[in-house]
Amino acid sequence: MVTEQSLEIMYSGDHWVARFTAMASPCEVLIETREECIARRAAAIASQCAWSIERKFSRYRDDNIVHRINTASGAPVVVDEETAKLLDFSDALTHMSGSRFDITSGVLRRAWTFDGSDRIPSQETIDEILRYVGWHKVRWERPRLRMRPGMEIDFGGIGKEYAVDAAARLIEIELGRISCVVNLGGDIAVRHPRADGAAWRVGVEAAAAPGSPIRTIGLRQGGVATSGDSRRFLLANGRRYSHILDARTGWPVPDAPRSVTVLADTCTQAGALSTLAILQGANARQFLIGQRVKFWIQ
Amino acid sequence: MSDNDPSMAATLAAATCALLGAGNASAADDEGDRWSIDSALLYYGEADNRVQDISAAISATRDFDDERKLTLSLTVDTLTGASPSGAIALDRPQTFTSPSGNKTYVTAAGKIPLDDTFLDTRYAATASWTQPLARLYTFSAGLGFSTEYDYTHLGANFSLARDFNKRNTTLFAGVAWSQDDIDPVGGAPIPMSQMLDAGDQSHKLGSDSKTVLDLLVGITQVLGRNTVLRVNYSFSDASGYLNDPYKIVSVVDPLSGDTLLRSPPSGAGPTGVYLYESRPDSRLKHSVYAELKHSLGRPVLHVAYRFMTDDWGIDSHTADARLRWPIGAAYFVEPQLRYYTQNEADFYRSSLRADEPVPQYASADFRLGSFDAVTAGVKFGGTTSRGGEWSARLEYYMQSGDVPSDQIIGNQARREQYPDLNAVIVQFGYKFRM
């Protein structure tokens, strides 16, 4: 589902804005420079980075490492360094979340369809699928991964935030201390404060409904990520089920906030904390207070 | 593992460092920039040198932790120009005593009389405080004060909102109270008293006052991912001095419809018989307002309707539509169209017949008459890279009204009875944080 579209670039006041689409999301790069060639280079780095991460880790393709892992039918798969790092990071998140977060939980989507309807799967269906869920059932001995047949991994929960930080880092490596914003569908990293110390103003969609304000955050440096999506839910028995599933039960997290936005040093950390917070359900706020980060809950 | 393990941040930082490599600086937001300043400059100009208003407003909002918020605002506006006094046109010049009571002015033959001594500067200040009360409640309280040379306003308001249904539904209720003191130039005329010669103040009293109580209840409902509906009902109870102290009604010959003539004994005074208007000393209004916002992809459509009815017999309808259309990432254009219509108050009288007893209530103020108005406008705005938001708005207002046919007597039919009103509105706004 890679949609490599043309890159649009334009000058806006005192910086360049580049737009493209990656990971089915509108993406934007803001670069503090007057030089069009520098802006074009930064935009090309960011878009190529996002597209290549999408190609490499999308579960919708049949020519990448994720596909090889998911179709290995119990055979061990030797993975490259980048994939290994992502698996290590997922492993850390699973431990930090008390196994609520799990990259093998994607198969539960076969049971749950979050389209605003009231279709709730039977417990039998969930139990059946849960046989294929659980990071503890996976043998991960770097660089070798071995899963039971029928199990699948999905980097959907961390891939976009990782791509944001990776793109920002590549821009820094090639172009030096240039102030830029990388925004992939609302997950954002700002590298280096602007020359005059002013903040970049980045819009974060706080609620899906029009009219509710898009929260604007003034960011000098750091990462912002939002988890939860008020557009994807189920309504049944008068209860609203979020699309975030608890990997331990196979059920949506009860009483989860609609969305959690976190500001942290990197977009990856912000994304991890916002996801872990949602998995805490009603305790999301308390959890985030304990992490001493700036956050916004809807 | 504990959900609030303090070492989690360090664990996550280490895991992130392993994933991304070292060298990530600490997050920094604009926490210090907590004042949000909103400034606006507005020009309102009626055609034919009627009312011109220039208004400058600035408001500052300070955000505190836990969504507590203080807002302070200051507005200065200057009104100049002339407005219709309520007297009807005549085929000969008419002389009136000015509101101050010490000089006279003349309106040319065939013209609707305008009182051109209109000049005023108003200063207004408000302060409000908003804070969450419990998890789903938001409380707000405010104070307002304004002063101009003949009018002082003091107001207070409170409101409470509660979210339901995962914040898809918000119910709110508010109450506002105000006390207004009116100290008209030359004193407040006794209702239905006759306009006297310059220098004669025997029909005028000192100052007066009114109080207004407003109640508001409403609901905001999210109707799916693209639509929000807001409906509210408001009730307003005004009591006290509700007259416009500068408005008059012509007394006319029951056959010709011409204003009864008068020879001012002192030489400087009205050349016709004019009575100061009289309105009831209370007014109850009910209004219902519905507003729908719907996003059509990036453009957002906003439609609203208001119905108001009061015990003065006025019913009004307002329909409003706006479409906010983004242009690129930084700009938008927003065309707007508004229609307003109202019928006249029960005691609206364009003139009073000399052969009828003086009614208890009568006003020829065109604002209490029957009229329609269309406002067409466009707003253009954008954001600067520093996060400042600017906008420019241009609107054209076209009002036309009529006097009920059973109130038109004799010669009045061939003269202009209800003047059209056209006005231009230009506004510039700039909003920024510091």
Image: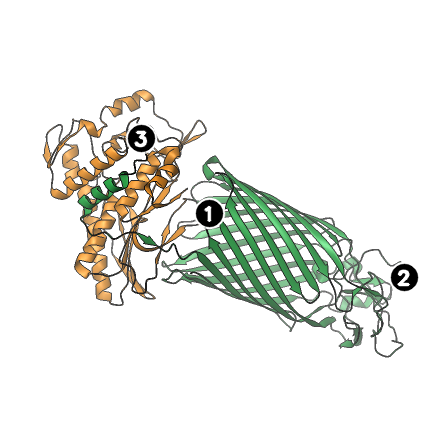
- Numbered disc total: 3
How far across and down, in percent of the image, does residue B419 sit?
69, 67
How far across and down, in percent of the image, does residue B350 sit?
78, 62
Residue on which the image places disc 2: B355
How far across and down, in percent of the image, does residue A222 sit?
29, 52
Question: Is A192 drawn above or below residue B21 in the view shown?
Answer: below
The chain that hosts pointer 2 is B
Chain identifier, colour orange = A
How far across and down, in percent of the image, does residue A106 sit?
26, 33
- Closer to the N terminus: mark 2 or mark 1? 1
Chain identifier, colour green = B
Closer-to-camera residue (B53/B111): B53
Which mark's residue is nearer the viewer, 2 or 1?
1
Q: Quadrant of the C terminus of chain A?
A: top left
- Residue at the spot x=60%, y=67% of the render? B77
Q: Residue furthest top?
A: A124
Numbered mark located on residue A246 in the image: 3
Mark 2, Cα crowd under 10 Å, few <14 / some 14-19 / many 20+, is: few
Q: Are marks 2 and 1 on the same chain?
A: yes
Residue on which the image places disc 1: B67
Left or right: where does residue A173 sit relative to residue A125? Answer: left
